[in-house]
Amino acid sequence: MYLNRSSRAALGTAAAVAALLVTGCGAEVESGAADAAAATVQRCGEPVEYTVPERAVAYEGGSADKLFALGLADRVHGYVMPPANPPVTESPWASDYAKVEMLSDDLLNKEVVVNAKADLVVAGWNSGFSEERGITPEILDRLGIQSFMHTESCYNYPGFPQKVTPFEALYSDLERLGKIFRVEDRAAEVVTGLKERVAKVQREAPQGDPVPVFLYDSGTDQAFTAGAQVPPTDVIRLAGGRNIFADLQERWTRVTWESVAEAAPEVIMIMDYGDQPAQEKIEFLRESPHTRDLPAVKQDKFFILDYNEGISGPRNVDGLEKFAEYLRTHGH
């Protein structure tokens, strides 16, 4: 998962990439879009000019899902999928993944992007883009490769931070990508559909005090959990629960077991990914002296959230609907 780290990025606007060939496949892109003026779109808090991409590279399921949801498979060259991500065959867009190239099963790096002749890279700040690994929007700008960052990850992007609630960030990304690829109408349809599903969940959410929920990602000495700035907090809130660490203005962060025990969560949400099955995490919580007496553990109230329902992407709403159903049947 993702740890925050302060860093500094200089100004930079994406250079235009030459020889753009606009095809008629996938989502409908306005004819002559390649010759049109560049579209100015926010990259976190920075206005950047984008030309229409033809060879986009997506990092992780959330990035690829956003592009595929907009009907842009024909403009995606490939994807980088680290081991934590569940198999792409489980995605609602499995057929789109099958049409494009898997470029790497490791973390995002500059060499993969350059070798792919990418003209756009979609990833998150410190969850894909990384100063430590030498792949940042600024570096790609100098190479003439456009980049787009998940708004959810912009909370601590140096120089150009942006802070919005995680679901609003999801809608914003779909709208911004729609503008970049000149498929604004399709983006508006997708966002409207997602908002309607969320509104239905809210109408049906349990009344009364929100159920206190603890998201357990990993960790033994300390717990790695979700702060205010990541999608599970909105999944919990919109379903009628309350993330016990929603007051932490962080993304993914570490907390003490004492603070978990003090909050007395009545439901534990398990983030499911990688090579540690969710059931192993549940067994740890049942056996650990820090957690075995928590109300949620004693009452066996565990909800498993799929990795791609917990990172920014359209599957956040799938996770919301599933968790809302769980709370309706296993709440207070």
Image: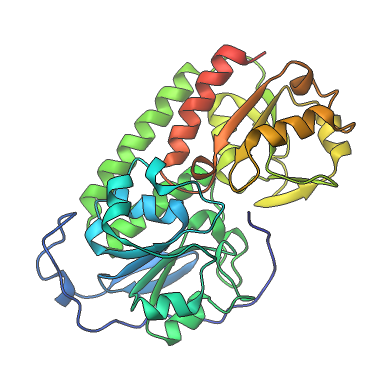
Determine which quarter of the picture holds residue 99. Answer: bottom left
Determine which quarter of the picture holds residue 163. Answer: bottom right
Q: Considering depth in this image, is 74 or 46 the residue closer to the camera?
A: 74
Position in image of residue 196 (x %, y %): 35, 30
Q: Where, quadrant-wise, is the N terminus in this rendering?
A: bottom right
Q: In the displayed orientation, state which residue is furthest to the bottom.
A: 142
What residue is at 84 percent from the left and 26 percent from the top? 292
Camera sees residue 250: no
Query: Up-down: is 268 above or below 48?
Result: above
Query: Up-down: is 14 above or below 254?
Result: below
Q: Considering depth in this image, is 204 or 309 the residue closer to the camera?
A: 309
Determine which quarter of the picture holds residue 307. Answer: top right
What residue is at 15 percent from the left and 56 percent from the top? 28
Camera sees residue 9: yes
Query: Up-down: is 149 above or below 307?
Result: below
Query: Up-down: is 209 above or below 199?
Result: above
Position in image of residue 278 (x %, y %): 64, 35
